[in-house]
Amino acid sequence: MNWVTWALAGLLAGSVVYCVFVLLAARSYLHQRTPPASRLTPISVLKPLAGVDEGLEANLRSFFEQDHAEFELLFAVRNAGDAAIPVVERLQERYPHVSSRLFLTGDPPYPNAKVYSLDRMLAEARYDLLVMSDSDVRVKPGFLESIAAEFSDARVALATCPYRAIAGQSLWSILEAEGMNTEFLGGLLVARWIDGVKFAVGPTIAARKSALCAIGGFSRLKDYLAEDYVMGRAAAHAGFGVILSRNIVEHRIGSESLAANARHRLRWARSTRRSRPAGYLGMLFTHPLTLSLALIAVDSRWWPSLLVACLFRIAAAWATSVWVLGVQPHWLLLPLQDLLSFVFWVAGFFGNTIVWRGRRYYLYPDGRFELRT
């Protein structure tokens, strides 16, 4: 056997070990103590909006219908013509007892428009405990109570909420949801298990306003595309307690065409490579099926490796999707999703531009970005 065969066999062995780590990390996550729900801590929910995403009204309604004793909802749009405004106004009329405000921010003075909206809402937020949540997130009525309970521990300053991806009708959205539920979450769980939580990712993050101000506020994040990751890393490095929340939210990714989905995935890959270069290289081990197929292509005598790769990939996917998130994967689509995921992982090593909401940006090696067109 040549060195290529041995190299691929070694990588596949590492991938199998990683799958075992996913199982152990999922068990560790599920066995942590869950604090009792708390209604005592008031919460400000910050919602940056831009247009009407699929299911927007139902997503926002889930926040208006929270059982928490004291909370406020803050919404921000860029201009008065934003189509999300009538949606917010309808909900404000329907739920007059809920404290809610809508802000017009104008055009952002720096690249990350989401950060600018959050910064404007932060200045108006009444409470120290903040929940920053994207427009495509849907939660259960007891969500804010559970968040308040986790922050009853004074050591906790920031929490990332894992998410259950809910796809739209398009095949590409279904495949992406499979990747989020069976692959992406595994990486978070393993990172937490091995090195603790030194990051923040995803569409919903809770944090203390005092901790955000201590790390420099949103002005520290304004030039980064992956502002969530930078926020969590800065908080951890400053000595604040950062956790992976036990509160799982629904991430409604909607239906996308192949072209739109490809732009979205490529943007995420290029951003991740610049935010976490070493971690991005390590993502190779999250692809046991692809590594096995490559090994068989080099030396067909290794065909049993595909059976081993399938067994451990299924086990890892079951641990994250079924055990942690409570959703059944589309098992027959999993191989196709894994191949697509590998293609976009490779593509992430090339190119330095991304398209976000119809605008093209240039990405710098340190994760900062700037508008080009």
Image: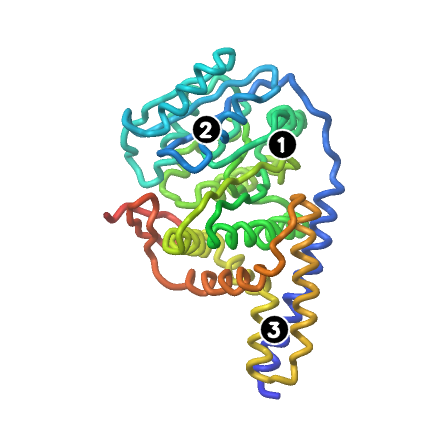
Q: Residue at x 65, y 62 (%)?
A: 313
From the viewer's side, name the closer residue of 320 and 209.
320
Contact check, label 2 and label 3, Cβ < 8 Å? no
Q: Which amino acid lies under the numbered mark 3 shown in the image of this protein? A: Ser
* Mark number, residue 156: 1
Q: Earlier in the sequence, mark 2 or mark 3?
A: 2
Residue 293, placed above or below residue 64: below
Classify mark 1: helix, strand or loop. Answer: strand
Q: Is residue 127 left or right of residue 150?
A: left
Give the residue type that dot 1 points to. Val
Q: Residues within 10 Å of mark 2 (few under 14, many from 20)?
A: some
Badge 1 crowding class, 10 Å Cα cut-off, few under 14, some 14 to 19, many 20 or more, is some
What amino acid does circle 2 point to? Glu
Q: CA distance from mark 2 to mark 1?
A: 31 Å
Q: Residue at x 52, y 36 (%)?
A: 204
Provide the residue designation for mark 3.
292
Q: Earlier in the sequence, mark 3 or mark 1?
A: 1
Which circle's residue, 2 or 1, is located before the other in the chain?
2
Contact (Cβ within 8 Å) of mark 3 with mark 1: no
* Disc nearest the viewer among 3 and 1: 3
- Image location of residue 175, percent across then percent down: 52, 55
List the residue tagged with mark 2. 57
